[in-house]
Image (tube, grey):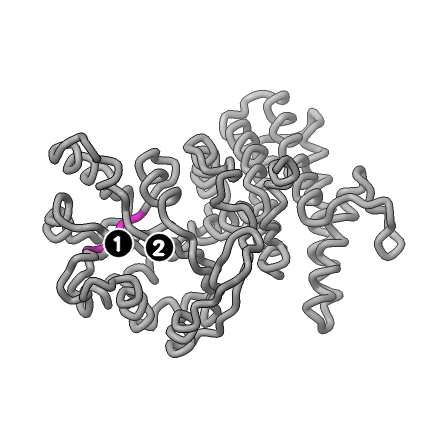
Amino acid sequence: MNIAFLFNSDHDSLSGYYGPEVLISILSANVIQRINRQMRVSIGDIPTYMASIGKGIKYLESLCENVYTPVNYDQLNTNKLSDTYTKSTVYCWLFQNITVDAADKLHTYLNQNDKSYLGAMDVDFSDPIHLKFFRNSLIESYRLKSSYCSILYLMSNNIDPDHMLKEDFEEHGFIVDYEDIGARRTYIDKYNTVEHFQRVEDFREIFVKLTKSNLNTIDDVIFALEELHPKIFDTFAAAARTLIRAETEEDLAQASLSGRRVLEKLADYLFPASKTAFKGRAVGKAEYKNRLWAYIETVLDDLGGDNDNVLVSLGKEADRLVELFNSGLHSNSTKEKVQDAFKDLVYWVHTVIELSPKEARKPYLAYEKSIFKL
């Protein structure tokens, strides 16, 4: 879930220098250090004033009411928040892929210990207002998992480390490094539209129902797939929509074909085709099954240790999924079989990516064509 934590930047307790003070307040909760899942954090001012220039107070108030409307998670202090609409800038920490349980704990601490805190709400990027004022307006600043923090920077810019920032994280138990996030969130990032996030939301809604999975598992998959290549949601969402309304053999065949295409795309992104064999196996464009095996084997080799059983298990599962989707192209398939195949596919993708989230991240892959045109 994406959850925004809001602060009154003009509150007397912040002395006018609110960014570092909010950082210390959040780190002092000792909550995010205990969250064992990949998260990204975007920070910054919510630009409602800028969007309201020349449009009057009533427009600003109405805009703020729309911006600060939660979908499912509402821990807002409405009175304190509404008091800022025409008086104060709202400062935000937006956590992508945080759990509700962790958000509750952080909210409880901030509510009790930070006088500038205005509350928390969930953010839906498929909502045009939320997309504009949260996802596309804030600066993606940190990646967090347990006690690890990566300070993010864009497109191989020379790093000018903020040593005080690094020290603040380290003083609160983090191991800190720096990470290039490629072209994401730059002007060549075309995956920042409502249409894209509606496809992501289609994936979430359908696969939560289909797999009966914990929402946290599906959100983990979404988080990882976006970093691998956002376009994969085009294929996944098409398959999901076809599957959910499938009534005929032709519908099932089309859904199965989409499932196979997901595996082909995953192979293309994780282990691109090569004319050079990998450990004696052909890994050309057509040999996408071999390339899935090759990716898993490469990651396990990097991790070290005796992982032969893991390789065989995940590799054979990939082969089985391919066969299941191929069989879905034939007349003896059923909707239940195809649904089960997609359910197993989601779990397999989650397991493979979790082997090494860092290796599965491809920060430039989705933007290569645009970069080459620069």
Residue 74 is situated, as x and y percent measured from the top left of the image, at: 23, 49
Give how far apart the Cα atoms at labels 1 and 2 are.
Answer: 8 Å
Element on which disc 1 rests: strand
Q: Quadrant of residue 66?
A: top left
- 10 Å neighbourhood of mark 2: few (<14), some, or many (≥20)? many
Query: In x, y percent, where is residue 226?
Result: 53, 45
Can you name the residue that lies furthest to the right here?
Answer: 280
Task: Judge from the rendering whether residue 340 lies leftward or rightward of residue 88; answer left or right.
Answer: right
Pointers 1 and 2 in contact (C-beta within 8 Å): yes
State which region is magenta.
Answer: 118-122
Q: Which mark is residue 106?
A: none
The one of 52 and 3 positioned closer to us in this rendering = 52
Identify the residue under disc 1: 91
Query: Which residue shows up at 19% across the image and 70% down it?
Result: 113
Label 1 environment density (alpha carbons within 10 Å; few <14, some 14–19, many ≥20): many
Quadrant assignment, res 43: bottom left
**Mark number, residue 43:** 2
* Left or right of 286 in this view: 31: left
Secondary structure at numbered mark 2: strand
Name the residue: 17% across, 36% down.
60
Asked whether residue 14 appears in the rendered view, the answer is yes
Residue 154 inside the magenta-drawn segment? no
Q: Is residue 341 visible?
A: no
The mark total stands at 2
Q: Is residue 246 left or right of residue 261?
A: left
Mark 1 residue type: Tyr
Q: Is residue 260 above or below residue 89?
A: above
Identify the amino acid type marked 2: Ile
Residue 23 at what x, y percent from top left? 32, 66
Asked whether residue 119 is drawn in magenta, I would say yes
- Image quadrant where one finds the C terminus: top right
The reply, left or right, for residue 374 in relation to residue 38 is right
